[in-house]
Image (tube, rainbow, N blue to C red):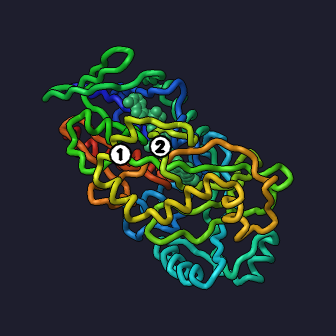
Amino acid sequence: MQKPNFIIIGGGIVGLATALKLSNTYPTASIHIIEKEPALARHQTGNNSGVVHAGVYYQPGSLKAEFCRTGGAMVEQFCAEHDIAFDRCGKLIVATNDIEVERMKELMTRCIANGLSPTWLNCEELEALEPNITGVAALHVTESAITDYTAITLKMADLLRAKGHEISLDTEVIAVKETSSEVTVTTNKGSFECSYLIACAGLMADRLAGMCGVDLDFRIVPFRGEYFELDASKATVCKNMIYPVPAPDMPFLGIHLTPTTNGSMTVGPNAVLSLAREGYTWTDINLSDLAEMIAFSGFRKVIKDNWKSGLTEFRNSLSRKRYLEECRKYCPSLTLDDLKARSSGVRAQAVLADGTLVHDFLLKNTARTLHVCNAPSPAATSSFAIGDYLVEKATEEFDLR
Ligand SMILES: Cc1cc2nc3c(=O)[nH]c(=O)nc-3n(C[C@H](O)[C@H](O)[C@H](O)COP(=O)(O)OP(=O)(O)OC[C@H]3O[C@@H](n4cnc5c(N)ncnc54)[C@H](O)[C@@H]3O)c2cc1C
């Protein structure tokens, strides 16, 4: 068979993990990663909580649950091999009322079904473990950890370059043409040919899929996650990550306290509709992104079904005081002065035409192109497992055996 060559679109952690797996599976193939930004990991990968999720929340048997478990172990191993920070600090999910206690019982069952060993703490046990945190009960998950996903992505890039593969930055894909024998990728820096293409384009996943003629029964809706960093005097307010009990049916986990590998403590993220695909602040508004969203029936349905929670998120985003109240439910000693500015992240959330928020991983393909259409949290945790799966799929769909 002729030597295959691959183009990967997207220099985030999923694109790099996929390229690395491809390079191991097809050692003679050439791989070219194309990224529109001047550096790797500039979007979701570089603007997240840095949590290596243990698999608390995910439907047992789903790809999300499976990839989280296997991917988390692979992240730990990669960090150990390449001297990247990894800290199994553990996590507490804290219930602050009886309704949340009931929901937390379901989470406990789910944790066990996903192979974890959570401990149920009453309020005294919680206080003994974390004196600054209050709640009526908590779930202690010792398997959860933190890391630095940008460092992981950059290390993968070094490994790929060392094997002779190419990474083009500042190079935006604007069109793709597929024939029966090859794929031509047109960018702002010229055209490139390849045998096969894998798109891991995060917030632009639907646009890349559309360029390749994939049937678009979904669109990406961007949800901004706004963070604060705690004042240095509060950076040790807790040792574990502290999470609220998430609202059922929403794919977001709620504002949490997360230690980082550089010794700081972040608060967040919330989940507000972003007015641009890459809208990191309220003043980032892109009219064509907005028009496209409004024209999509799935987006209108999401707004109709979730306007109440959306309005609450909107208010909490505009008022630091309200945002603080969310954290004070479980960490009452925090004050407004403790909240220091920190950059946001924007989540790429796939939504179906009927308004369903896609919770699991979603993949689509044509004869020579494969598209990651939904890789929501915990896709950074799962990135190596997703990379393995994508290469398996590519081998199957492109008939490379
Ligand atoms: C606020 C927030 C918190 C999160 N917290 C966690 C967490 O704690 N743990 C966890 O496991 N996951 C977390 N996630 C999820 C995780 O960060 C993402 O699922 C993961 O980073 C997705 O990686 P990716 O490579 O698919 O996307 P991205 O990192 O977004 O990369 C996609 C890349 O494609 C490039 N691209 C797009 N279009 C083009 C084009 N036309 N031409 C060239 N390049 C293009 C973009 O510039 C971008 O660099 C969080 C996400 C957010 C936003």
Q: Which residue is mark 2?
A: 275
- Residue that appears at 37% across and 50% down: 374
Quarter in which the C terminus is drawn:
top left
Q: CA distance from mark 2 to mark 1?
A: 9 Å
Q: Is residue 221 left or right of residue 252?
A: left
Secondary structure at numbered mark 1:
helix
Residue furthest to the left in view is 180
Secondary structure at numbered mark 2:
loop
For the residue marked with disc 1, what is the amino acid? Met
Work out whether residue 335 can be spotted: yes
Q: Which mark is residue 319?
A: none
Q: 25 or 268, which is in the foreground?
A: 268
Work out whether residue 164 can be spotted: no
- Residue that appears at 74% across and 52% down: 265
**Label 1 packing within 10 angstroms: few (<14), some (14-19), many (20+):** many
> Of callouts 2 and 1, which one flags the residue occurring earlier in the amino acid sequence?
2
Q: Quadrant of residue 117?
A: bottom right
- The image shows residue 284 at horizontal and vertical percentages of 53, 37
- Residue that appears at 22% across and 41% down: 214
- Residue that appears at 45% across and 26% down: 36
- The image shows residue 243 at horizontal and vertical percentages of 63, 66
Q: Which residue is mark 1?
A: 293
